[in-house]
Amino acid sequence: MNERNHRRVVNGVALLALLASVRAMAAGMDHMGHGKVLMDHSQMNHGAAPTGHPSTPLPVITDADRQSAFPPLPGHRVHDRALNWAVIVDQLEYQHFESSNALNWNATAWVGGDIDRLWLRSEGEREAGKMHKAELQALWGHAISPWWELVAGLRQDFKPASGQAWAAFGIQGTPLYGLELQATAYAGERQQTALRLEAAYAMLLSNRWGLEPTLEANFFGHDDAAREQGSGLADSEVGLRLRYEITRGFAPYVGVSFNRLHGNRADQAREDGEDLGQTRLVAGVRLRF
């Protein structure tokens, strides 16, 4: 190949390279232009009002609008000023034992608020058609914590014998869920003193079934055979009752009660030929109003 033809080939290759470069630059500019068109299209205002300037002005909020949206609420009532009440008949039952049968009751009522309440307690026993024990207590209760309450007032025994009046002072509370405790001291006629301890624990077996063990113990300062009182621990009762709640206010139950006399009271009963201990089968109903 002569020199002239060689130059022609070189010039041709250079021209092709230049053309390729021009085409590449044109393609890049085309792409950039298309993106700009898309961007400008996305920023177009399709007939909407300018930002921050609504076509219809919003009305000014007035006090009447605020009051209709947020009406004034009544003030919160203090709980201890609310007057509430309840009547609870824990035991209303028939008891059967070897030598006889009896009708037994144990009831409580209260009226008042969260801090101060008037309490009424009553319990008794009618055995073989005759009233054997009956008492009524009127106590004023004052809460000293969320779970404990001091009580003070009067107790009147109607049976046994001719009855007896007492001044009463004690404490009651629920330190654990379902556990109820009472400890009450009494000062009565003829310088007689007494102490009663009571405990009950309601165990829920299901939404309807409940098992409740109970304990009651009575102590006296002096002997009084006519009123069936012996110094020291005189008598105790341990019970176990299984109930079914048809409603929260009506729950029939069955159970067993172990009654026993102790100390000087047992000696008195032994001299009179009475039983020192009894196992009683019970059936009754618990009522709440």
Image (tube, helix red, strand yellow):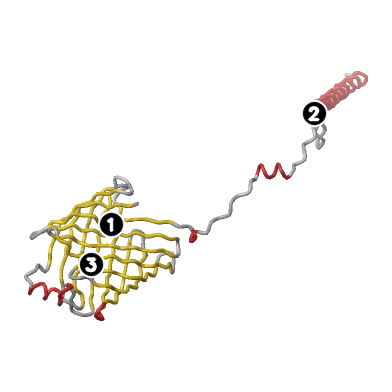
Q: Position of residue 275 (x, y in %)?
A: 9, 67
Q: Residue at x 23, y 76 (%)?
A: 220
The quadrant of the image that shows the N terminus is top right
What residue would you read off at disc 3? 158
Task: Say which label, 1 or 3, has the lower sequence index.
Answer: 1
Q: Nearer the viewer, residue 275 or 14?
A: 275
For marks 3 and 2, the one nearer the N-term is: 2
Q: Looking at the image, which is closer to me, 85 or 32?
A: 85
Say whether disc 2 or disc 1 marks the residue closer to the N-terminus: 2
Residue type at mark 2 is Ala
Q: Residue 82: percent from the left, percent from the top?
A: 48, 57
Q: Residues within 10 Å of mark 1 (few under 14, many from 20)?
A: some
Which residue lies at the image location 8% right of the left edge and 73% below the top edge?
Answer: 270
Q: Position of residue 131 (x, y in %)?
A: 17, 62
| Dot 3 and dot 2 residues touching (CB under 8 Å) | no
Q: CA distance from mark 1 to mark 3?
A: 21 Å
Q: Compared with residue 13, is residue 153 higher up or lower down, i.e. above or below?
A: below
Secondary structure under the numbered disc 2 in the rendered image = loop
What amino acid type should be assigned to the residue bearing mark 3?
Phe
Q: Is residue 99 above or below residue 51?
A: below
Residue 90, numbered label: 1
- Spatial distance from mark 3 to mark 2, Cα to Cα? 93 Å
**Which is more foreground, mark 2 or mark 1?**
1
The picture quadrant where one finds residue 15 is top right
Residue 155: assigned label:
none
Check if mark 2's residue and mark 1's residue have beta carbons within 8 Å: no
x 37%, y 60%: residue: 110
> Is residue 226 shown left or right of residue 53?
left
Q: Residue at x 68, y 45 (%)?
A: 67
Quarter holding residue 83: bottom left
